[in-house]
Image (cartoon, coloured by chain):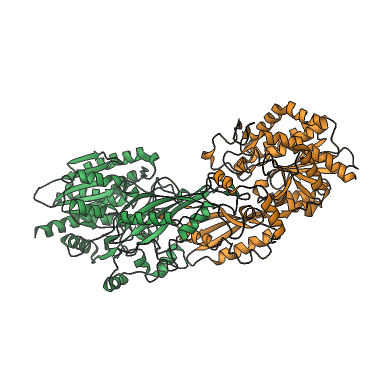
Chain colours: A green, B orange
């Protein structure tokens, strides 16, 4: 497909500008103040899908944010690819650490991206990667090379747990019927080391609240005599890991699938420099569960991290107060075969049970999802593999990611089809962080690789 | 002094309205945004002191907030009372817990204050108690009953450590020379149980910062593989107390003065109901250092409390992030003979030493002050005792407070005079908390009692 590369290069500037327009809309799903921007973004996605050649595009209402659905059916007898992506983004906090405003995209060169990268919230996660599929469709329809049917399902709640997606899938199984689900919401090892994500961690996200006295107290008059909710919260959270950084919630590890020695040996082969890793994060050492490597800790092992904590006086200067309440947001990354609902209950039961006298503790489950591992001996995986080989001239490395796309497990269950995770982002893209960006090379490479998956998948499914 | 009580009752409404005017100015010293209100409040205090009969009132510049100094010298051969107070207030946070705006004073009845109480930040601490002295002076000058000389020193940095006060005293020893220092910035046991504060705890206030990776990270891609600054901070803070709630900072207790059995027995005689205490705070149990009673824990024992903690995402909804930094404000209440500067260094050394690999820890000392205990066999104390007996018809109970007025120890050292702490507030006044208030009865009772101290002190000093 020489025309493919030529077409992408010829339309490069337009492809970039269209993405930049999309990135200007602050579609933050975690904050209801941005509801109108969510709707604006859904409209923009709908318009772009129509331009790209979809026959039918609709904005589907849900109990939460709308889902954009589009399709182009060329022959009922041909296989169907369902593309999933999300148009919502993470909050930009901490805003003061951005070098440029998160919703005013700019292109800058970096060491890893000499061709330039687009800096904006959502540049990689997931507007940029989602839009690669829209432009890949544009190429295939305009060049008459679309080999099969295609459907798009672009949601607006991925960053807050995709709550409405299950509701939507349940009610639209026929409409969503497909032979493979294609997602670009992960990364690859390096620009010259293509990889396919074969596993994702599950997630359980909770918020905890510790209440002590019924009002904030003077820390002189009451200090030392009543339980301080912040001190208590720190003791409770600290107790969730033992001296080997194992998680202490009873039953937490019961269903954890232990990786085989062979699997661990294969993982150890993936190119990885601990020094470069530490240097990139400016840390003097890594940290984690005893007995596992860094790559194991962030992929095949479950974790418990505090994502946010607050209580008492956090303004300028000093306030000698004992707060009435202290709070924390805590998330657990899960692995096969942990069940996120069961883990959430185990955590709630344990955390409430370790509350000392003098305080009341409440655990509010936020959201979650199951972990996922895909086999690599399928035609779905083979097709992706062949696409990378043709595009990169290299065989992609199968790797398990530490991230979570809670709905992937749901897809298998409800739609009975396998998911292929073709990610084109890099760890250094700073997704969920200030100065998130997406390399122009990666963006264009994705558009050049995706149509090859369609080609190989259609061929393989017809053999 | 029957005229005294009559005068106070006749002018009651004006006394209340003048205080309310003062309370409307948000003189928050912790937040530099309120600098203009600080200056406005100093001007208002100056005007009121002049109205009350001071011959000379000046606003004295300092490296920080100005100090209002006023005096009325009637006879160089008579003793001089130096009144100390502060016109700055605590921040009102958390603002949403106030039933009425903190700087729009209103009068409401409460169970303890059927005569009504003034609700506003600073109502009791310390504008209300400081203003009792201004009105007491007004009575004595207008009725020609001022028996001695009087000086006022009203500062604007008490809530942030009185840093400029030491600077000011050092440079104005002559101007501030006195025979006794009189302060109303503490409380009494109950409306029908007058008490005199004979001890104050010292203070060491620090801010700690834990830095991990050089940017916020995606908790899926990095979770479990790098030190999470919030998790680390909770472990470090939790380790500062052992299972008996003793503080684990090496050397922390070395200089703590152990109270004698006799002293502890006397303290145990003070009227106190643990059930009422728990009920008032809506807690199912008290909490604190093993081997000590509640009244001992909050007065004669040192403490370590987190006054504020923050890090990561604290907004609405969920953000799966590992924060680059986590922070806490920590204060230690100290007792004789702990030295606050030494304790601050011990804490800094210890806290930095327990930081695990993978993070950097910084401890920034904020401010502090020495603990203070006054003897009760002095004419200063006797004069206060006699004033209470005459005003309340009861002998006041000497009690040690858990609070800190860092400058009291400084006064003794620099001005060579004893301090008498005549507090008219109640524990239930919620100072430093939302809905701070000051009982109208307490306010007027203070004005009715203070002139009696002048009378008895002058008499006793001339015997």
Q: Is B196 in front, or is B335?
A: B196
Q: Look at 36% across and 42% down and name the residue there.
A: A25
User: What is the x, y in percent for residue A11?
Assistant: 26, 49
* Picture quadrant of residue A32: top left
Q: Give the number of callouts.
A: 0
User: What is the x, y in percent for residue B197?
Assistant: 72, 48
* Picture quadrant of residue B13: top right
Quick one: quadrant of the N terminus of chain A? bottom left
Quick one: quadrant of the C terminus of chain A? bottom left
When the figure is inspected, residue B137 is found, relative to residue B185, above or below; the finding is: above
Q: In screen coordinates, is B325 left or right of A422?
A: right
Q: Is A41 in front, or is B285?
A: B285
User: What is the x, y in percent for residue A89?
Assistant: 35, 48
User: What is the x, y in percent for residue A353?
Assistant: 42, 56
Q: Look at 60% across and 39% down and name the residue there.
A: B436
Q: In screen coordinates, is A432 left or right of A59?
A: right
Q: Is B25 in front, or is A81?
A: B25
Q: In screen coordinates, is B353 left or right of A283?
A: right
Q: Is A204 in front, or is A354?
A: A354
Q: Can residue A298 be spotted in the picture?
A: yes
Q: Can residue A117 be spotted in the picture?
A: no
């Amino acid at each position: 497909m020489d025309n493919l590369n030529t077409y992408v290069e010829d339309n490069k500037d337009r492809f970039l500008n269209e993405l930049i327009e999309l990135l200007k809309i602050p579609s933050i799903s975690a904050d209801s103040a941005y509801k109108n921007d969510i709707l604006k973004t859904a409209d923009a996605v709908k318009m772009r899908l129509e331009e790209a050649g979809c026959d039918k595009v609709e904005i589907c209402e849900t109990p939460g944010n709308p889902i954009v659905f589009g399709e182009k059916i060329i022959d009922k007898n041909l296989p169907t690819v369902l593309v999933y992506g999300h148009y919502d983004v993470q909050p930009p906090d901490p805003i003061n650490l951005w070098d440029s405003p998160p919703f005013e995209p700019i292109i800058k060169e970096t060491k890893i991206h000499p061709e330039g990268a687009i800096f904006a919230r959502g540049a990689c996660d997931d507007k940029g990667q989602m839009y690669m599929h829209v432009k890949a469709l544009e190429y295939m329809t305009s060049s008459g090379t679309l080999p099969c049917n295609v459907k798009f399902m672009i949601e607006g709640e991925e960053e807050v747990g995709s709550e409405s997606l299950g509701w939507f899938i349940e009610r639209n199984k026929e409409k969503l019927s497909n032979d493979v689900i294609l997602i670009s919401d992960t990364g690859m090892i390096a620009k010259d080391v293509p990889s396919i994500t074969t596993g994702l961690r599950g997630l359980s996200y909770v918020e905890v609240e510790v209440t002590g006295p019924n009002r904030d107290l003077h820390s002189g008059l009451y200090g030392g005599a009543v339980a301080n909710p912040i001190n208590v919260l720190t003791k409770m959270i600290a107790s969730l890991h033992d001296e080997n950084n194992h998680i202490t919630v009873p039953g937490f590890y019961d269903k954890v699938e232990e990786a085989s020695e062979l699997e661990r040996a294969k993982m150890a082969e993936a190119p990885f420099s601990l020094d470069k890793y530490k240097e990139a994060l400016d840390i003097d050492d890594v940290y984690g569960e005893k007995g596992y490597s860094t790559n194991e800790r962030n992929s095949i092992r479950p974790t418990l991290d505090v994502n946010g904590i607050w209580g008492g006086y956090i303004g300028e200067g000093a306030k000698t107060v004992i707060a009435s309440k202290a709070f924390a947001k805590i998330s657990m990354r899960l692995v096969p075969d942990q069940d996120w609902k069961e883990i959430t209950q185990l955590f709630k039961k344990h955390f409430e049970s370790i509350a000392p006298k003098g305080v009341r503790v409440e655990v509010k489950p936020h959201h979650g999802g199951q972990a996922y591992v895909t086999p690599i001996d399928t035609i779905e995986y083979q097709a992706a593999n062949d696409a990378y080989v043709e595009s990169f001239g290299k065989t992609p490395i199968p790797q398990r990611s530490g991230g979570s796309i809670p709905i992937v497990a749901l897809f298998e269950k409800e739609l009975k089809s396998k998911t292929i995770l073709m990610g084109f982002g890099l760890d250094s893209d700073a997704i969920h962080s200030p100065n998130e960006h997406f390399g122009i090379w990666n963006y264009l490479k994705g558009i050049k690789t995706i149509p090859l998956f369609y080609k190989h998948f259609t061929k393989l499914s017809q053999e």
